Image (cartoon, helix red, strand yellow):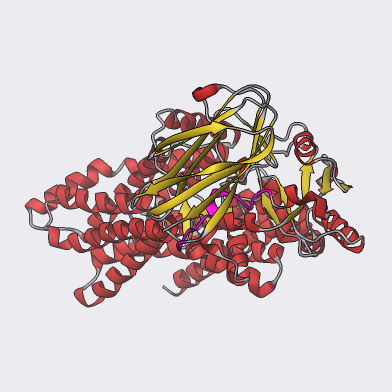
């Protein structure tokens, strides 16, 4: 017994040492550049630090457009505390990854302990995953370092399974606390990411129900855990709609139907498996280890039920194996149920749980460790311990080989995008020359890193290639600012790059241009300044966006920029919308369609016409009216529109004539 305990303690130290070396190896390889900085510091990855920065600065959060899975709990809390307290996004990212690795090991270790499995395997499993990431080839594990990818979902799977298995065994005195913990975990994680309801709640309830049915067990033993899980998941989905989908923020559309999603998932898995043989082998071994005992377990439970014996170990084992199967089936459904799955989302949100559940959880989570031993035959526990000792030693050695990059840690902690330093210098130079201070515009992938890594207080908002508002994962209230410059990537192959030619055509030549070298010898970026009073059309181009209209009281008016409104015929300009040739009633030059409080409104528009015989027609719910347009500039007479509760204010301006007509602004005033 003494020797056995000493051997076990030695193994515990070895597997936790493998985890620690794995974390250090990942940090060292990140510092050396083997883990690309774009994976760690792209706009998607920096979403939560940007959200917390807005909150800490007291910004108006009502305009935030969240991703389908907001991932606020606990990722934003952890990353926000680290980043705000340390003041260093690079150090916070490394520490966040280390904490996630530790949480993952502890959560699944608790699940294995509750299921009579091999708890010491899980620090080793996470250490092995980290060493694979440190190699630079298995970047599948990079979400462990990225708060925006909600790696906590995978941690929550282990913690939730531990609570469910604990409830299967718990005595009545302890069940209350376990049920409360399970409800809080499922509700909070589902409110943060609706996928948790699919990948945890559904498999948990299903595995409990199937085990009860197969074993002919009374529902009272399973109903509390299953009921709390289902109820908490439903409340979490409702809370998500309330928190992220109404009033304070807008949730992007999530559920859809894409029958090709499963085919793309299978293609991606085959390609990844052929390139990463070790993960594929672990995945297949885990699948076989979980599935092969299911028929025998069901038969044993059935025999036990007829004999009025319900072996607890068999029940726990069946629940565990069915749960793992359910998680995999749920992950396979994600690409079909979410209509906009791309390979990056499959990588972060689908295949990571699948690979972990099968490759690292499946075969060791519940290997039956009971059974007699004899002098000539080693027990399953002894064989597993020997295998773990060998693998832990190999993992430690591999981790040690990657520590060579530690000498570059100082450079990593000082790193920031090359364009960020150049932008800071350009802003300082223009300020010295008396240019107006304001915000900047950049494409989605440039705006957030430049903003978060700026040391000169640069603030940027993301726009699409045609300089229209970007509606993906950022604070829409940023468009209320005065803009004085734009950052344009010159790489012709970059699909999101801003169109500099369109920028110059719309707003004229810039007051100054600065050229910034790209990261690691990449394409240059150009900073174009429109920071003089005569550049008001550029600086105020978003001020008339429909999203900012309120109309909270009678007498309040709002001027919409026609460039921000929809059109069937007109070209979008920085100063409005323009049609070169009238197309009669077949198409509308300007379409106003906004959500406003019920009341009576008056709608008019400013115009400039190049045709002395042009005519206009304004159509609204109450009817239409029209008239002639004077040559040159003028104002279309106001049309009154009554809006009922829950209705939209709709108004269309139709142009008939030749030559051209430009509408610059549409003014709406609430009469009552």
Residue 589: percent from the left, percent from the top? 57, 32
- Residue positioned 73% across, 47% down in the render: 537
User: Does 417 appear above or below 409?
Assistant: above
Q: Characterize the magenta stretch by its predominant secondary structure.
A: loop
**In the image, residue 299 lies at what x, y percent?**
17, 44
* Left or right: where 357 falls relative to 493: left
Residue 188 in which image quadrant: bottom left
Q: Is residue 549 magenta?
A: yes
Nearest the viewer among 72 and 586 is 586
Q: Is residue 371 visible?
A: no
Q: Is residue 252 left or right of residue 207?
A: right
Residue 234, above or below 263: below
Q: Is residue 96 magenta?
A: no
Quick one: which residue is furthest to the bottom in this view? 173
Percent of width and height locating residue 276:
59, 37
Q: Position of residue 78 (x, y in %)?
A: 55, 68
The quadrant of the rendering that contains the N terminus is: bottom left
Labels in figure, total: 0
113, 599: nearer the viewer: 599
Q: Looking at the picture, does residue 259 appear above or below residue 398?
A: above
Is residue 541 visible in the rendered image? The answer is yes
> Start and end of the magenta stretch?
541-554
Residue at x 61% of width, y 65% of height: 54
Which image quarter: residue 160? Answer: bottom left
Residue at 59%, 56% in the rendered image: 47
* Vertical comparison of 155 with 521: above or below: below
């Amino acid at each position: 017994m003494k020797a056995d305990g000493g051997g076990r303690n030695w193994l515990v130290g070895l597997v936790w040492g493998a985890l620690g070396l794995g974390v250090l190896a990942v940090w060292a390889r990140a510092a050396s550049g083997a883990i690309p900085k774009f994976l760690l510091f792209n706009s998607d990855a920096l979403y939560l630090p940007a959200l917390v920065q807005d909150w800490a600065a007291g910004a108006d959060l009502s305009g935030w457009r969240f991703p389908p899975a907001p991932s606020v709990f606990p990722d934003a809390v952890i990353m926000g505390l680290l980043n705000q307290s340390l003041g260093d996004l690079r150090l916070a990212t490394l520490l966040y990854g280390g904490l996630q690795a530790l949480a993952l090991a502890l959560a699944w270790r608790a699940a294995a302990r509750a299921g009579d499995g091999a708890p010491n395997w899980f620090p080793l499993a996470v250490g092995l995953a980290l060493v694979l990431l440190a190699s630079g080839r298995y970047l599948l594990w990079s979400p462990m370092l990225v708060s925006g990818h909600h790696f906590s979902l995978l941690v929550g799977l282990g913690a939730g399974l531990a609570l469910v298995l604990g409830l299967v065994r718990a005595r009545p005195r302890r069940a209350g606390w376990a049920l409360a913990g399970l409800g809080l975990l499922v509700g909070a994680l589902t409110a943060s990411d609706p996928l948790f309801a699919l990948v945890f709640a559904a498999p948990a309830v299903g595995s409990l129900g199937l085990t009860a049915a197969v074993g002919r067990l009374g529902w009272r033993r399973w109903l509390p855990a299953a009921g709390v899980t289902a109820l908490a998941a439903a409340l979490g989905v409702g809370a998500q709609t309330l928190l992220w989908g109404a009033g304070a923020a807008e949730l992007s559309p999530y559920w859809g139907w894409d029958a090709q999603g499963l085919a793309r998932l299978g293609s991606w898995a085959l390609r990844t498996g052929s390139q990463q043989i070790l993960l594929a082998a672990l995945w297949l071994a885990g699948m076989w280890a979980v599935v092969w005992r299911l028929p025998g377990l069901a038969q044993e439970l059935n025999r036990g039920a007829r004999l009025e014996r319900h072996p607890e170990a068999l029940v726990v084992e069946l629940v565990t194996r069915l749960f793992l199967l359910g998680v995999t089936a749920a992950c396979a459904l994600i690409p079909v149920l979410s209509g906009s799955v791309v390979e990056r989302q499959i990588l972060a949100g689908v295949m990571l749980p699948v690979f972990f559940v099968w490759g690292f959880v499946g075969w060791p989570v519940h290997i039956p460790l009971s059974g007699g031993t004899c002098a000539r035959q080693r027990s399953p526990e002894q064989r597993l311990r020997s295998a773990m000792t060998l693998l832990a030693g190999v993992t430690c050695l591999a981790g040690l080989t990657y520590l060579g990059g530690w000498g570059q840690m100082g450079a990593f902690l000082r790193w920031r995008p090359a364009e960020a330093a150049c932008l800071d210098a350009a802003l300082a130079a223009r300020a010295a020359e008396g240019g107006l201070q304001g915000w900047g515009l950049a494409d989605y992938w440039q705006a957030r890193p430049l903003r978060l890594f700026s040391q000169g207080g640069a603030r940027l908002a993301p726009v699409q290639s045609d300089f229209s508002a970007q509606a993906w994962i950022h604070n829409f209230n940023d468009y209320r600012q005065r803009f004085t410059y734009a950052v344009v990537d010159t790489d012709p192959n970059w699909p999101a790059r801003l169109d500099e030619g369109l920028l110059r055509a719309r707003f004229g030549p810039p007051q100054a241009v600065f050229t910034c070298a790209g990261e690691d010898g990449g394409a240059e970026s150009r900073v174009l300044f429109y920071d003089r009073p005569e550049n008001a059309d550029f600086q105020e181009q978003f001020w008339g966006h429909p999203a900012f209209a309120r109309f909270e009281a009678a007498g309040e008016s709002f001027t919409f920029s026609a460039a921000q409104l929809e059109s069937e015929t007109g070209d979008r300009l920085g100063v409005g919308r323009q049609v070169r040739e009238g197309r009669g009633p077949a198409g509308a030059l300007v379409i106003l369609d906004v959500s406003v409080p019920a009341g009576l409104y008056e709608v008019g528009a400013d115009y400039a016409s190049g045709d002395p015989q042009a005519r206009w027609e304004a159509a609204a719910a109450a009817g239409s009216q029209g008239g002639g347009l004077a040559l040159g500039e003028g104002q279309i007479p106001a049309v009154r529109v009554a809006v009922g509760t829950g209705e939209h204010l709709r108004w269309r301006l139709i142009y008939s004539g030749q030559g051209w007509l430009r509408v610059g602004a549409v003014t709406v005033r609430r009469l009552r």
